[in-house]
Amino acid sequence: MIPSFYKTELYGVEFPGFPSNAGASSLALQFQLEQSQWFDSAKIINHQFDQIRLLVNYAYRTVPFYKKLFDEHNFLPESLQNPEDITNIPLLKRTELQENPERIISQEIPREHGHVFDVSTSGSTGRPVDVKRTVLMNQVWDGLILREHNWYQRDVTQEYATIKYAKKGEWEPPFGLIRQGWGSATQLIFDNGLSSYLNSSAPIDVQLDWLKHRNPAYLFIYPTNLFELAKRAIDRNIKIDNLKHIRTNGESLPDGLRDVCKRAFDVELYDIYGTLEVGFIAFQCPEQGHYHVQSENVYVEILDENDKPCKPGGIGRVVITSLHNFATPLIRYDIGDYASFGDPCECGRGLPVISKIYGRTRNVLTLPNGDKYWPTFGYREYSKIADIKQFQIIQKTLTKLHVRLVCEQMTSDQEDSLREVIRDAMRYDFEIDITYHDNLERGPSDKFEEFKSELL
Ligand SMILES: [Zn+2]
């Protein structure tokens, strides 16, 4: 991070900075996070194991759901003796959390963990997931936000813009919302720059004009929204002079997005992997392209179909233990994503490496022979055929796809070329319907899926 200097809240002291108590404890946590990222992997897992053991014992004592689940599986919390034993803890399926949110709440949430908040993931990922979280968790997440700013050397005195979903009437163009400070993680301890917000329901041209006007150093935006924005910036030859890099979260990155982003704005994109229920799971390594697990917040496993750990490179289900949630403990929680681990990172950080995040089960294409995979469908290919502003492919049956497009009506030759490109990318001779739309709607959390299957 490039701060002007630490903020001081104490009368009579300008140097060195004495932030408020909350700011000071945030800095104290940061001091630890600076060190723990360099621990070797065994040391990290040992510390996580100590935390998991505490959490599991607590959940067994105070959460009826876990008492029943562990008893049914004859699992005894005291049988946890070393990190290898973690695989003996029964898994928590996403559907169980969706169906039993109130039974997974602790009957004795520790008062020391502070105020309790309700969090509900939006319906765009299917049924919502309701969990509770505490101030303690927010403190850990703030610590990770600071780490992330630090990794990418953000200048906290600059403006930070956000384009994302907000309720109708909020953050509306032409001005959006402007605030002093980026949020508690930074403004408690630094003289922090402005943050600006725009509702992502604004048309792409309006978004681009707003961004040009704000001219921020950093931009936070959902990947598919960024894709449209970057393509429009290229078409209109608009540059954002002050922009240093872009931060994305919330969807798997569409193919070609990094390239288009580089061409449009000449900046890098840093993606964050996380969910509302468990917070930050992984950030991109500042030196390599892959993701580092945020091991101080979550313990991540990647499991094959027999629930055995995958080797590096093997694709499996992402299973998360949220280390500090004593309100709705999420222990070995199958979040419904697929990913693969990579080899240890050359940067020297011991935080585990996730080499690729594939997305959700419902984004898997199924071929008539039973093969399944996450299709990618490159911008380069389809942009050669027509000026397609947005597209979505939906698998209706094993042999039929529906393609929804935002573009001018194509000629039948163009449509046939597009079908060919899709068949090639999808590795099967699908029957393909094409329909045209003014725009393709986003879910309430802004998540947009370029491919989804209705076969589940
Ligand atoms: Zn690294």
Image (tube, rainbow, N blue to C red):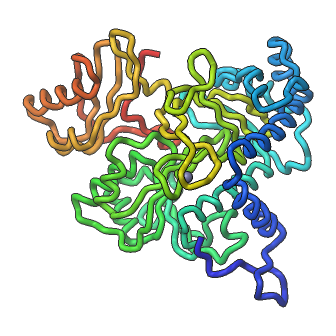
Q: Residue visible at 23% across and 65% down?
A: 237
Quadrant in which the N terminus appears = bottom right
Residue 143 at x, y = what percent? 70, 58
Tell me if 268 is positioned left or right of 425 in this view: right
Q: Quadrant of residue 420?
A: top left
Q: Residue at x 34, y 56 (%)?
A: 261
In the image: residue 342, left or right of residue 142: left
Q: Residue at x 34, y 41 (%)?
A: 255
Residue that extends furthest to the bottom in the rendered view of this protein: 12
In the image, residue 374 sits, relative to residue 208, either above or below, namely: above
Q: Is residue 428 left or right of residue 306?
A: left
> Which of the pair 345/424 is nearer the observer?
345
User: In the image shown, does 394 or 260 lie closer to the viewer?
Assistant: 260
Say which of 16 and 33 sits in front: 33
Which quadrant of the structure image shows residue 326? top right
How many marks overall?
A: 0
Q: Position of residue 413 (x, y in %)?
A: 7, 30
Percent position of residue 431, x then y: 22, 16
The percent coordinates of residue 206 (x first, y second) are 35, 60
Rendered position, 324 above or below 417: below
The answer to whether 143 is drawn above or below residue 2 in the figure is: above
Judge left or right: residue 382 versus residue 317.
Answer: left
Q: Residue at x 23, y 43 (%)?
A: 380
Q: Is residue 324 visible?
A: no
Q: Is residue 372 visible?
A: yes
